[in-house]
Image (tube, rainbow, N blue to C red):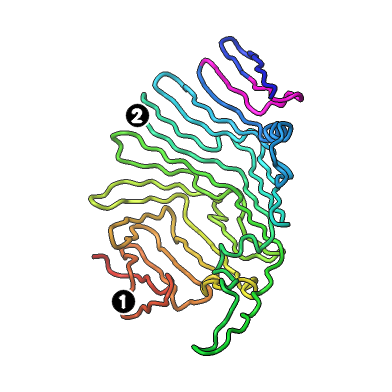
Amino acid sequence: MQLRLRLTSLAEGDVDVTVLVGKQRHEPIVFELHQHSLGVKVDLGEALAAARELGESADEIEQLSGVLELQLVENQARDYSLDLNVLEALKAVLHSDGDTVSASLGASSPAMQLRVDGNARRFLASTDLGALQVLGPLRKFADSFGSSSEDSSGVLYTGALSAPVPAPAPPLIQGALDMFLAGLEGSLEYVADSDELHLDGLGFGDKASYIKNDGKTLLGLDLNAQQGRHVDLLLEPEGERTKISISPGFDLKLALAFQQIADQVDGIADYLLNDTWHFWFDGAAPVIVAGDDQLQVQAGTLHLESAADPSANVSVAAGMCLAEADVATVSDGDDWRHRFDAAVCQ
């Protein structure tokens, strides 16, 4: 194996060490030794090319590209961060058992960060992932939505003394699956002695996310579609409970239509077949207080709604609590839609 190192310096005191592999001098790894940071950068496309030149078997990988960077950064004295950067969008195309699955992740920097600032006595954790998309045949993901369609033995018995008969053939699972998450964002900040926890910019990207089968939506997810698709939360202790202030508001919709594949995938839960769940607050600047066994609404009105079962809808006005429903009205087969009710706070 041919291995070389190349040293470069783009600024005084900063050195990059590039690892060159093979006759083609592929550059899969760069070590960054800078005055105020240490890092390693990995080029996935170059790594795959180097592996193939060195004789590694990678026939199942059609494409692999993108650049990742991990850095330990000194922002200033007593202030350090660990950053994961997606410098160039990631993409992978894989072949398995005659099927092709592809995945991509958009570029973002930093995609994830942990920061400790000893001067301000502050801890920060944040994520800003780009759009994630996975494409492939439905049969590769069917077990994620329901129980397996195939009988383990492939044989049915009609009685203790009966001869075995072949089991019915499992349904044919076909079509393409498209899973798209528009992003994943948000930061958590804690300042010592403040007794406050800030969760800012929480969201799922700048558009709706979805799962589709041959263009038909199985799941749709959207947060604060009319309010910038992000939400800020402020958590403060209130005795043994936690007060949560919400800004600018909260409006989450989850559309479910797995009935589109119910004839192909066994075991899909009934509540996933055809429904739209809507969780939202009326009023500006809603506030809730979370305790051990109930959730008090201090400002605004909380709504939990199901399009498929309006009888289970719940509205909790300010001064009331969201609590578990009376056990006498809930059966073992009921899902969340029948397990909550508005109640006087205890």
Q: Which residues make up the magenta segment? A: 18-35
Q: Secondary structure at mark 1?
A: helix
**Quarter of the figure that contains the C terminus:** bottom left
Nearest the eye: 205 or 217: 217
Nearest the eye: 240 or 226: 240
Which amino acid type is marked by label 1? Val
Q: Which mark is residue 121?
A: 2
Q: Is residue 114 above or below residue 20?
A: below
Q: Please name the residue shown 58% across and 21% down the image.
A: 32
Q: Please name the residue shown 44% across and 25% down the image.
A: 80
Give the distance between the C-alpha atoms of the residues marked 1 and 2, in whole angstroms.
47 Å
Within 10 Å of disc 2 (Cα), the crowding (few <14, some 14-19, many 20+) is few
Q: Which residue is mark 1?
A: 327
Nearest the eye: 65 or 14: 65
Which amino acid type is marked by label 2? Arg
Image mark count: 2
Q: Which mark is residue 204?
A: none
Q: Position of residue 187 (x, y in %)?
A: 46, 41
**Residue 40 shows up from this direction:** yes
Within 10 Å of disc 1 (Cα), the crowding (few <14, some 14-19, many 20+) is few
191 on left or right of 177 = left
Instruction: Check whether the beta carbons of the residues at disc 1 and disc 2 lie within 8 A of each other.
Output: no
**Quarter of the figure that contains the N terminus:** top right
- Let me know if residue 229 is in the magenta part: no
176 on left or right of 327 = right
Q: Position of residue 301 (x, y in %)?
A: 40, 63
- Let me know if residue 29 is in the magenta part: yes
| Foreground disc of the pair 1, 2 | 1
Which badge, 1 or 2, is on the more N-terminal residue? Answer: 2
Q: Quadrant of residue 340?
A: bottom left
Q: Which residue is at the far right?
A: 24
Dominant SS in magenta = strand
